[in-house]
Amino acid sequence: MAEVYIDTLTLENFGPFYGEHTIDLRSLEGKCGVLVGGKNGAGKTHLLRALYLAVVGESGVGDLKKVETGSDATRFAFEKSLNRRALAEGLDTMRLKAVVRLRDDKIGSRKVELLREVRFRPNSSPVWEHYATRSDTAGRIEDEQVIHKLRDAFLPRHLARFFFFDAERSQSINLGQQDIVDGVSRILGLWTYSELENDLRQLINSKIPRVFNAAGGPDPETTLAELNGQVITAEGILKARRKEHDVLERDLHEVEVELLEVEDDLKTLGAVDPDELQKAQERRAELTEAKAKLESKLTEAWELALPVSLLGVYRKELHDALSTEERRREWESAKSTVEPKIPQVKRDVFGSTPKEFELQPDVESFYMKRLEDALHRLFHPPPQGMPDRVYLADRNDTSAQVRARLATSQRELHDLAEMCVNIEKMDVELRELDQKLRQMQQNTAAYKRGVELHEKRAVLIHRRDQITERLKDIDAEITRLDVELTDLKRQETIQQEIADRAERGESLAALSTRYREAAGEIRSRAAIQMRRQVSEEVGRLWVEIAEREREFEGMDFDSNWQCWLVRRGGKKVTWEETNTSAGQRQVRMLAFYEALRRLAKLVPPLVVDTPLARLDKEVRANVLDRLYLSGHQSIILSTNAEIDPEGELFDRVRNRLARVYTLHPHGKADSPNYEVRITSDYFGHDL
C-alpha cells in the first residue's frame, strides 16, 4: 500500500503569518500525530488552507470557497490573503511550499517539493507561479501541466479534498452530490472502470470502423494455423520437461537415501573427521603462538620491570642524581665553549677602534676588565644544586636512557599473575589437543575411513545440489511453459473466434461492445462490493463511537451514497428519520473519511481543523483514538477547549504525538500589526 506524507509546510506572508514560517510535520519514532493548538482566531484555519493550497495549487481556491460558504466573517476571501503588514510595507507576494513524500513498499520512497508563489495586484486577479523539484531527478520544474501531473502522482486533488477538512463544516456535506460521488469513486479505484468504458466506446465509434474496413493484414486462418503449431510444440516440450522432472526426483531420492547411510556410518563407526583434525591442528598452532608471546612478555617483565621496581624509593633519588649530572655536563659544555672565546670577544669590542672613539688607556683597561668579569660570571659560580663532579654516567644520552627505564610503568608487574594463569590454561589446553591429535593420528584406519566417508559425503551433497538446482530450473521452465501454453491457447481460442466471426461476417465492434459491457458490469459489481465495505466500516465505527449499539446494528449506503441506518432486527431507516444530533452527524462523516482511508489505493495524510467540536467527552476520546490517530500521519488543529493541555484527553494521546505547536496571535485583529507567532509546545506544555 502506498502512503503519502507531508514532511514540511512553509508559509510566507499568508494571512496572519508575517514573514517566513516553516513547520516540521514529520513523524518521529513511529508516532503519527502532529497537534497544532491555538485559540479562536489564532490562524488554525489559515494553516489548513495553506496546506491545501500548497498541495493542490490554484484550483484549490475554488474548492475552499465551496466548502467555506457562510457569513462574510467565515467565508474564504483569497484575494485578501496577503499579510496586512507585508502589504503595508509594499510587498505583494506570498509563498506556500509543501514537501510531500510518497512511500511505497514496491518502489521505495520519493519526495517532491511544491512551491506556489502568488502576486497580488490592485484591481486585478492574483497571478500564480508554480515550481517543483523532485528527489529522484535534478533541476527545477516550471511547466504547470507537468507539475499538476506530478502532484496527482503524489497527492491527487480528489484525495486532498476529502482528507484536508474542517470537521465542523464537514457534517453538512451531502454525500449524494455528484462531485462527492466522483471523488469517492476515484479514491476507491472505481474510476478506472469508467475510463475503460469511455475508451472502449471511443474504440467502437471511431477506431474499430477505420481498422476493420481497411484492407491488408494477415489472413485469420493462416494466423490460426501458426498458433496451432506453436501450441503443439509447447505441449511437446512441456511433456519432455515433466518426464525429466520425474526422473530427477527419483535420482534425488536415491542420493538422499545414500547420503543418510553415509551419515549413519560416520556416527556409528567413529570415523575421524578430516575437518575436525585440521581445526584441532590450527587451534594448536594458534595456542602455541599465543603462549610464546605471553612467555616473551613475562620474561621481559622479569628482566626489566621487576629489577627496576626493587629499587623502591631509590628510583627517584637515582633519577634526580642523573638529572643534576646532565645539567652539570651541559654547564661544563657551555663553559668550555664560551671561555676560550673571551680574548677574541675583548679584541672584537676594543680592537681597531676609530680614532674619535678611542678611550684613554686607564678607561679602556677598566671596561675591558668589567667585560671579562661579566663573561666569567656567566659560569661562576655554577648554579645551586649542581654536583661537583660527574660519576654516574659519562654521556647525557646514556643518562636519558637510564632515566627512561626508571620511569617505566609497572603495569607488567600487575599482569604477572594473570599472565601466569593464562599460560597455565594454555598448557592444559595444549596437552588436551596433543592427546586428541595423537589419538586421531594413531587411529589410521578410522582416519582413512573418515576421509573416504567425508569425500563420498561431499560428492553426494554436490550431486544433490546439482539435481536440486536442475529441478528448480525445470520447475521454472515448466511454469513458464504452462503460462506460455495457456496464453497460446487463449490466443488460439481468440483467433478461432476471430476466424469464425470472419467466416460468419461478425463485426469486431460487437466484441468490443461486449468488453465494454463487461467493464460496466465489473464496475457495477465492484461499486456494490466497495460500497458494502464502506458501509460496514462506517456503520461499525459510528455505532461504537456514538454508543448506539442497543438501537442500531450498522449502516448502509445506496448507489447514490444516501445513508440508511440498520436497526436491531434488520429494519432500515433513513438517516433523516433518526433525527441525529450535530455531533453524531460529525462522527458519521469522520467514520466515512476513515473508511475511505482504509480502502484507498493511495493513502493520504489526515489534516483536520476543529476536530472535536460538538462532541461530548466520551466520544472525543474515541474519535481521537480510533479515527484521527489511527493512520500513518495525522495533523490536528485544535483549540484548548477541544483538547485541554492540562486535561485527561491530552495525557491520553501525548505518547502518540510526534510534534506539538501553538499559534500565538498578537496585535489587533483588523490592523497591520496583527501577526501569529509559532512555538514548539502545546499551550506551554511540552511532550
Image (cartoon, grey):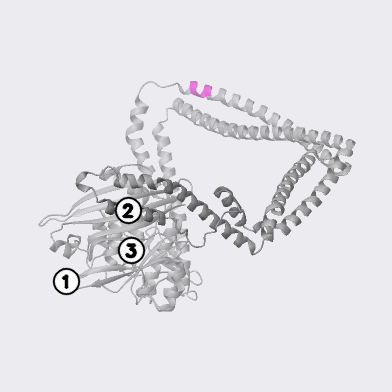
Residue mark closest to the camera, 2 vs 1? 1
Where's residue 326, x and y in %? 53, 53
Q: Nearer the viewer, residue 655 or 371?
A: 371
| Residue 317 pos. (x, y %) | 60, 62
Q: Nearer the viewer, residue 230 or 212?
A: 230
The residue beneath circle 3 is 165
Question: Is any atom of residue 617 visible in this view?
Answer: yes
Alpha-carbon distance for marks 3 and 1? Answer: 26 Å
> In which quarter of the view is residue 442 placed?
top right
Which residue sits at x=80%, y=48%? 430
Mark drawn on residue 670: 1
Q: Amino acid at mark 1?
A: Asp
Q: Which of the two discs, 3 and 2, labels the residue nearer the N terminus?
A: 2
Disc 3 from disc 2: Cα separation: 13 Å
Dot 3 crowding, Cα within 10 Å, few <14, some 14–19, many 20+: many
Residue 223 in magenta? yes
Task: Write down the region rendered in magenta.
Answer: 222-226
Q: Is residue 416 above or below residue 490?
A: below
The amino acid marked with disc number 3 is Phe
**First reached walking from the N terminus: tag 2 or tag 1:** 2
Please state if 255 lies on the left or on the right of 496 as rendered: right
Main secondary structure found in the magenta portion: helix
Q: Which residue is mark 2?
A: 157
Q: Residue at x 57, y 60 (%)?
A: 320
Query: Which comes sooner in the sequence, label 3 or label 1?
Result: 3
State if disc 1 and disc 2 touch (CB < 8 Å). no
Dot 2: element: helix
| 120 lies left or right of 17 | left
Spatial separation of the CA atoms under disc 2 and disc 1: 33 Å
